[in-house]
Amino acid sequence: MQRTQDIHKQLVGIMDRYKHDVLSTGKDYNRVRKAICSGFFWNAATKDPQEGYKTLLEGTPVYIHPSSALFNRTP
């Protein structure tokens, strides 16, 4: 429960910093799904034969972190 409270506090702080209102979605789960998907899209990457992976949006080279379960695994 402490982790949940920490995440909530962090999200409220981000919303305050950018002067956004904190609103409930009620039972409109599609809004939550869209928010999660838009966040994941910024981290999406494709395999690049020379440099590991490149992000879809900017083509920036990225690498799998050594602590990841995917590290040293072939895709």
Image (tube, rainbow, N blue to C red):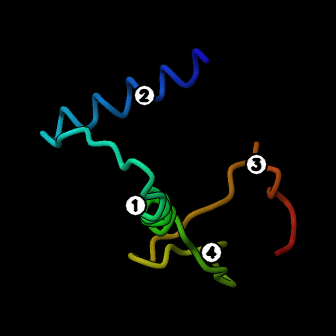
Q: Which badge, 4 or 3, is on the more N-terminal residue? A: 4
Q: Nearer the viewer, mark 2 or mark 1?
A: 1
Please state the horizontal and vertical placement of residue 20, each as a whole percent of the image. Answer: 17, 43
* Mark 2 residue type: His
CA gap between label 2 and label 1 equals 17 Å
**Circle 3/circle 1 CB separation < 8 Å:** no
Q: Nearer the viewer, mark 4 or mark 3?
A: 3
Please state the horizontal and vertical placement of residue 71, each as a whole percent of the image. Answer: 80, 56
Q: Residues within 10 Å of mark 2 (few under 14, many from 20)?
A: few
Q: Nearer the viewer, mark 2 or mark 4?
A: 2
* Mark 1 residue type: Arg
Is 12 placed left or right of 52 in the picture?
left
Q: Is residue 20 above or below residue 28?
A: above
Q: Residues within 10 Å of mark 3 (few under 14, many from 20)?
A: few
Q: Which badge, 3 or 1, is on the more N-terminal residue? A: 1
Residue topped by disc 2: 8
Q: Which badge, 1 or 4, is on the more N-terminal residue? A: 1
**Circle 4/circle 3 CB separation < 8 Å:** no
Give the label on residue 31, or none.
1
* Mark 3 residue type: Ser
* Mark 4 residue type: Glu
Q: Secondary structure at mark 1?
A: helix
CA gap between label 4 and label 3 equals 18 Å
CA gap between label 2 and label 4 equals 36 Å
Residue topped by disc 3: 68
Q: Which badge, 2 or 4, is on the more N-terminal residue? A: 2
Residue topped by disc 4: 51
Q: Nearer the viewer, mark 3 or mark 1?
A: 1
Q: Quadrant of residue 14?
A: top left
- Give 24 or 37, whichever is nearer the viewer: 24
Q: Quadrant of residue 48?
A: bottom right
Residue shown at 36% from the left, 34% from the top: 11
